[in-house]
Structures are given as structure tokens and as C-alpha cells.
């Protein structure tokens, strides 16, 4: 933000972002429930909406939190606020999934998985999902990792340095896609750690885009 400019982006509502989030959420639901369309081939790349979520997260956090971090908000306070926002929804999802699976697996099997999920710890000792109780949880965990990196380091980088980080992360994402055979790394034990490359690429691009949007001159909606 240019020196002397006192207004902060927190007060600016961007309905278009909410619309994009809604589209991405619908796309992900369709991907996981292919019977909605009757033919999975129509939506077999809708998992890429997760990358859009990562990008939108970087964009929104840049506009909403960077000014407060610059004004002295600590990393600890920032992350407490992020956890207060994300963890209740995460816990609710874990509880719903546990109720659905408890009849099949038994309570003694489900409770340890619930505890690990609530602590954000992936189960990497067996095949299948890294978060067996709540499969999509992997993306929220990586988003929190991105938030820490943002508050601790990314916000201090110049635009050019951000683009360099994004380029390196993009190469990492390409390598992850080559290794996994698709750009869908993240949910499973075998490729959970590669989800970090997807997050780093999309989130950093979101940060850079938000900075460009913040610098752009604004035209009034009505002359």
C-alpha cells in the first residue's frame, strides 16, 4: 500500500470472490459425487477447483490480513484467528464423517482417527486417505501451512521475489503432477506431501494478484 494511504482493504467487499468460491465448492461436490451429472467424464478435472480455493485464499488473506500484520498483529494472534475460523468447520465435518463410518468400523477404530483429525495430524502409516475420517481435510491443513508462511515470510517479499517463488512452486507442482500421474496430489497417503506444491503455487499467485489489484486505480461505478 502506498505511503500515506490510510484506508485498508478489509472494508472492501468483493462479491465476485464469493461467487468464485461458490462455483468452486459446487464443482468439488460434483467431482466427489459424479452421479449428479451421471457421467464422471464431464467433471473428471473438477478437482482443480481446490487449486482455485488456494489461489482465492492467498488473494483474500493478502487484502484482509497483510495490513493488520504490518500494523503489528503477531503471527501467533493471526494463526489463532485462522484456527478459530477454520477449526470449528473442520471439527463438524469430522463428527459427521465419524457418525457415518462408526457402524462399519467400530468406535474403537474411529475415535483415534477422530483425535488425529482434530489435531490436524495425517495418518501416514497405511494406504488410503491421509485423513481417513475427513478426506478433504488435507486442503485445509495445507492452507494453514500457507497462512503461516504468508505471515512469517511471503508478506515481506517484493512482487518480483513473489513471482520467483511462484515460478519455483509451479515447477514443483509440475514435478508433483508428473510423479502422481495427475495434478491431483494431496488426499492420499502416497501423495499427501505433494499437495504442498499445489498449495504453494496457487496460494503465492493469489498473493501476487491481490497486490496488483490493490495497486490498480479504481474507477467509480457511476460517473
Image (tube, rainbow, N blue to C red):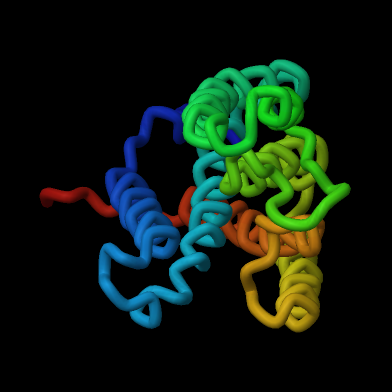
Q: Is residue 196 left or right of residue 27?
A: right
Give how far across and how far down residue 221 sits, in percent: 17, 50
* Relative to 78, residue 135 above or below: below
Q: Tell which residue pokes out farthest to the left in this image.
A: 223
Numbered marks: total: 0
Q: Residue at x 75, y 83 (%)?
A: 178
Quarter assignment of residue 216: bottom left
Give how far across and how far down residue 19 sits, in percent: 29, 51
Q: Nearer the viewer, residue 147 or 136?
A: 136
Point out the image quarter for the N terminus.
top right
Give how far across and how far down residue 180 sits, in percent: 74, 76
Quarter assignment of residue 206: bottom right
Q: Residue at x 67, y 29 (%)?
A: 110
Q: Nearer the viewer, residue 105 or 68?
A: 105
Q: Is residue 167 visible?
A: no
Give how far across and how far down residue 190 sits, in percent: 80, 63
Q: Residue at x 49, y 25 (%)?
A: 92
Amino acid at each position: 500500500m502506498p505511503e500515506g494511504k490510510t484506508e485498508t482493504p478489509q472494508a472492501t467487499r468483493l462479491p465476485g470472490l464469493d461467487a468464485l468460491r461458490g462455483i468452486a465448492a459446487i464443482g468439488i461436490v460434483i467431482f466427489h459425487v459424479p452421479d449428479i451429472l451421471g457421467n464422471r467424464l464431464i467433471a473428471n478435472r473438477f478437482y482443480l477447483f481446490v487449486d482455485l480455493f488456494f489461489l482465492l485464499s492467498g488473494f483474500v488473506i493478502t487484502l484482509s490480513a497483510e495490513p493488520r500484520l504490518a500494523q503489528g498483529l503477531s503471527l501467533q494472534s493471526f494463526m489463532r484467528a485462522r484456527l478459530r475460523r477454520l477449526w470449528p468447520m473442520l471439527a463438524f465435518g469430522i463428527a459427521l464423517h465419524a457418525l457415518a463410518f462408526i457402524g462399519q468400523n467400530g468406535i474403537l477404530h474411529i475415535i483415534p482417527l477422530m483425535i488425529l483429525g482434530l489435531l490436524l495430524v495425517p495418518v501416514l502409516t497405511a494406504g488410503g486417505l491421509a485423513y481417513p475420517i475427513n478426506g478433504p481435510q488435507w486442503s485445509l491443513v495445507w492452507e494453514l501451512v500457507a497462512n503461516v508462511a504468508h505471515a512469517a515470510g511471503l508478506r515481506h517479499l517484493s512482487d518480483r521475489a513473489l513471482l520467483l517463488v511462484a515460478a519455483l512452486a509451479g515447477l514443483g507442482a509440475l514435478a508433483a503432477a508428473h510423479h502422481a500421474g495427475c495434478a491431483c496430489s494431496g488426499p492420499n497417503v502416497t501423495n499427501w506431501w505433494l499437495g504442498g506444491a499445489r498449495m504453494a503455487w496457487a496460494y503465492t499467485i493469489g498473493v501476487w494478484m491481490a497486490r496488483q489489484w490493490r495497486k490498480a486505480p479504481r474507477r467509480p461505478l457511476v460517473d
